[in-house]
Amino acid sequence: MTKPLYKAVKTTLLDRIRSGDLAFGDPLPNDADLAEEFGCARLTVYRAMRELADEGYVERRRRAGTRVATRASRGVQLSIARVDEEIFARNAVYRYERLLREKAVPPAAVVTAFALKAGQKALHIRCRHWADDRVFQLEDRWINLEAVPEAAERPFLHYGPNHWLLEHVPFSEVHHDISAVCADAADAEGLKVAVGHALLRLGRTTVSKAGCITVADLKHPGELFSLCSDPQPA
Amino acid sequence: MTKPLYKAVKTTLLDRIRSGDLAFGDPLPNDADLAEEFGCARLTVYRAMRELADEGYVERRRRAGTRVATRASRGVQLSIARVDEEIFARNAVYRYERLLREKAVPPAAVVTAFALKAGQKALHIRCRHWADDRVFQLEDRWINLEAVPEAAERPFLHYGPNHWLLEHVPFSEVHHDISAVCADAADAEGLKVAVGHALLRLGRTTVSKAGCITVADLKHPGELFSLCSDPQPA
DNA sequence: CAGTGGTCTAGACCACTTC
DNA sequence: AAGTGGTCTAGACCACTGG
């Protein structure tokens, strides 16, 4: 239960930074000196420092030493839960509904992403995710059957493709693209909102070793969904 | 130039995971055995493993060992640049324009965030950021003068409050909230778009040791701005 | 209670880069 | 060239927890 030493060192240094005691660009003592000050091994200081550097608080350079980082604009960490979990967390009843399943030639952007030959088809799914009596998310997805041929057998009638893909495709990288759009006629009908309604759109591209697996376009009514950043680590 | 040993171990293990050679939930050998396999010290394996765990690829538990993590839905890392840098990166000309500067009693939500007494005023800035001849971002910001009294002296006529705050307030935590809204009359006028236009909205709350510093409401025309996730680390 | 991961040390050497 | 951070080792002990 006792706090690890490297963490104690880390928070001590972080306090000096956050209190304004050390200003932007100010140098910190070198690792060896700090190790002596804290009465510990240099590796212990090093680990504390490396975490501070990873989190963007300090910048380290060989020979030049360690300084308080200048740009406070560090990254933002979001966690995006699965849509059914998100709805469950709101104490709403989740319901899945498939609207379309077809094999078709995808639009050009998807053909490029999947590296398909001319005229080659992919699996196209349109579905929606209800929270009680509102449509929470409208999903339009293409699945690369070259990379995931097993998907061709799946009806995706009672559960969404994302659910199945997460369990059957090995670890993959996911790229997100977040934007705001106005509902066009198809969006409006699918989401049961008026044309022109503000929508939060998530574009999601999943890439595994075998290539680009799937491209999804996920739209939420603006008033139902927002993304919040995670609390920053201590 | 030669790759550090711990990184080589890490990518070797990651390849086994990503290739599907190891499926979700499968156990990995313990650190000591892997150290023997790779012919290195246990700490080297440990460091590789810790990074894999931090990045969400594996789950480690004492006594139970290390397993391939189940939930592929790891966090999303965004980097949000300063608005002037963002505009510069698009090869557009940046221009700042202040619309309003006043000391006033803020709305209830801000009063709570700042922990102000009844009737106590804060600094209110409204401004916009142009990219060439389009309004790229409309900013509505409250600054807590209890926490940053120096801000009261600043006109914020030629540069934005964010710029100044980043340089004059010690390291702070930032919380973001991303949503899509329709432009109301004030938004429409400020952004030079039609009422009902889809806007990408960023709510940003900055908290330092001295308490909540500032609350900002940043709106972009939906078609001008989207947020992309950063590439995941190797 | 035994085996796993987590922390720590003392010492060494290396890589980089600024002085 | 010298001083900084970065990596690595061999060994040790501890904390936690599943069998």
Image (spheres, coloured by chain):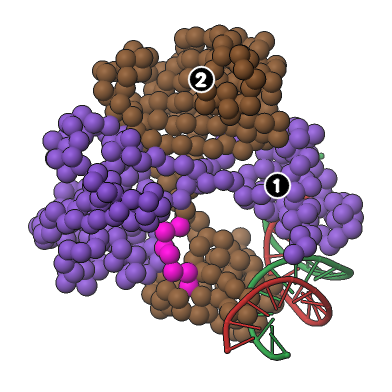
Chain colours: A purple, B brown, C green, D red
Q: Decide if residue A190 is on the left or right side of residue B179.
A: left
Secondary structure under the numbered disc 2 in the rendered image: loop
Q: Residue at x 13, y 35 (%)?
A: A185
- What range of the chain is rendered magenta? B68-74
Q: Observer-nearest residue: B185 or A206?
A: B185
Q: Residue at x 27, y 18 (%)?
A: B195
Q: Name the residue under label 1.
A: A60
Q: Decide if residue A202 is on the left or right side of residue A191.
A: right
User: Which SS type dominates the magenta stretch?
Assistant: loop
Q: Which amino acid does label 2 sit on?
A: Pro
Q: Which residue is drawn at 13% across and 59% down?
A: A101
Which quadrant of the rendered structure holds the N terminus of chain B?
Answer: bottom right
Residue A33 lies in magenta, yes or no?
A: no
Q: Observer-nearest residue: D15 or C9?
A: D15
Task: Give percent across and percent down for residue A116.
Answer: 19, 59
Task: Give percent across and percent down for residue A27.
Answer: 78, 39
Q: Name the residue under label 2.
A: B107
